[in-house]
Image (spheres, grey):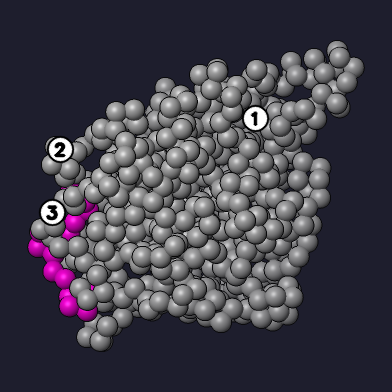
Amino acid sequence: MSLVLNRRNFVAAAAAGGGSVALASLFPAWAQPVSSGIIAPLPVVSGNDITLRIARQTMRIDGKVSRAIGINGTVPGPLIRLKQGQTARINVVNDLDVDSSIHWHGLLLPFQMDGVPGVSFPGIKPRSTFVYEFPVIQSGTYWYHSHSGLQEQLGHYGPIVIDPEGADPIAYDREHVVVLSDHSQLSPEAIFRKMKVNPGHFNMQRQTLSGLLAGKDQPLKDRLEWGRMRMDPTDIADVNGSTYQFLVNGHGPKDNWTALFTPGERVRLRIINASAMSIFNVRIPGLRLTIVQADGLNVRPVEVDEFQIAVAETYDVIVTPTGDQAYTLVAEANDRSGMGRATLAPRAGMVAEVPPLRERPLTTMKDMGMGDMDMSGGAIAGMDHSGMAMGTAPSAPADAACPPEHAKMGHCTPADAAPAAVDHSAMGHGSGGMDHSMRDFSVAPQVDKNPGVQTISPMPVDRMGEPGQGLEDVEHKVLTYYDLVALDRNPDVRAPDRSLDIHLTGNMERFMWSFDGMKMSDHHEPIPFIEGERVRINLINDSMMSHPIHLHGHFFELVTGKGDHSPRKHTVLVQPGGSASFDFTADALGDWAFHCHMLYHMHAGMMRVVSVRPRGEAA
């Protein structure tokens, strides 16, 4: 039975029944009666000399008090407003009893100011101050967060807006910064421990007999096949609405954070996903969204009805509400286990109907890197009779060269690489089904063979042209990476010098995560790059989970066929079982973090160091 979510009908029904309190408790937070609206904007700090103080505190979410780490007494931390061309001096005071840090996500600065303990600086000791000082050479929407332990989950994050030196090419009358995040009453350490013991601990959306009988879940024969592989098709999000509250600017759904507008205004929404583990599908029913900026850089305006925003991404959106009415901003978790919501309205106290959660998605053979395999017939789309994949694996440009120091590390893909043969026995096809091992390392020779690598995707495909899990069949326009076109010509349009394949590896049963089977904690050598070289990175997701991959200190160009106007980003979501490619210029000397921005994936090992070395220096 679906929930009735028209707020006036809900309140009237509760009152008529004489049990409004009891009835309300049966509804999820986003469907319960809301406050008159919190319209307080985020606090702002600006200027050439800024002080931020990190400290433990409490925060109140939908009336409940929760432990947190805040900055200057708030969660999120204050909006840092800078101007392109200035020099920022930011004094960070650590009032915690443990080390802390701040990373300036997406900002181009000297690596010593990047804020990653153990990589670019030692960290900030308890009861001490560290001064970050760097030139501000860009503009756009960014954010900052802790890179120490699991502090980010507790509220250690905040937004950054950098105004351009000259005229802003984006015309708007009013703006609102919208920080999406997730929060739990459980400590982040407890969340991590529970997932190590049972990675499916928080999944309360498993398939049921009633779902099978109602035709909502997989047919029994398919379910048996998935069980044989020890895979759960409802395993979309590691941590979800069963323990998380989804926040907008630090407020829960019942708090009803409200952004005001005057009808007819062009309203710019600077949307930041500062969550630890939540991918959101964002829409405003009744309003079209014009995407004008991605990860802080301007793109040609593209009109959509919805977009998926991965952890650590930012999108700037223009909306033009014309009526004297309220609109609901919906940030639905990608596994449909809950939502963050806010209101856009001409006046405080207004609310709009909140749509019900849509049916939760199920993973497919494509999410396992199996192309469009038909479970019942065992046939895999995209394979010819010889057992060869008809589509080639990611490879380097025809003129690519592989320096010897990289070749010996297995970090180059030959330009004339033939499609990898698919080993049916490795996938269990010889027995009429699939076993759960699926570890054909012949298609990924650089991957370390260890228990932390559960699967190797045999047939990964480029999924950057897809809208994201659960959004394939919606009846409106959803943004894809292929829709993005840079507003300005890319600063470096050279062809790549070489190509590097990086596999996103893990063992979901043990909650182990890595790159190429190698964890950060194993102290592997940094991934080397030479100053000024142009490299194509092919990210190949060997797991059934989504991974937003972030490279510090650089922007990169997505390989989506847009030529010298390829969209430039600092974070890219690699869909399950799929691949994503980008070109980047190694133009920032130093050591830089490279990691999955799912906080617990990074904490479990999916992080490495990228080292950009001066040309001529030995690798």
Residue 28 at what x, y percent from top left? Answer: 71, 32
Query: Which residue matches tag 1?
Result: 346
Mark 3 against mark 2, which lies toward the viewer?
2
Q: Quadrant of residue 496?
A: bottom left
The residue furthest top is 16
Q: Quadrant of residue 355?
A: top right
Mark carried by residue 384: 2
Which residue is rendered at x = 39% and y = 30% of the image? Answer: 472
Q: Amino acid at mark 2?
A: Asp
| First reached walking from the N terminus: tag 3 or tag 2 | 2
Residue 155 at what x, y percent from top left? Answer: 67, 57
Query: Which residue matches tag 3?
Result: 418
Estimate the spatial distance between the alpha carbons at disc 3 and disc 1, rounded to whole Å: 60 Å
Which residue is rendered at x = 52% and y = 37% of the image? Answer: 234
Residue 560 at what x, y percent from top left? Answer: 26, 46
| Residue 72 falls inside the magenta stretch | no
Few, some or many residues within 10 Å of mark 3 (<14, 14–19, 20+): few
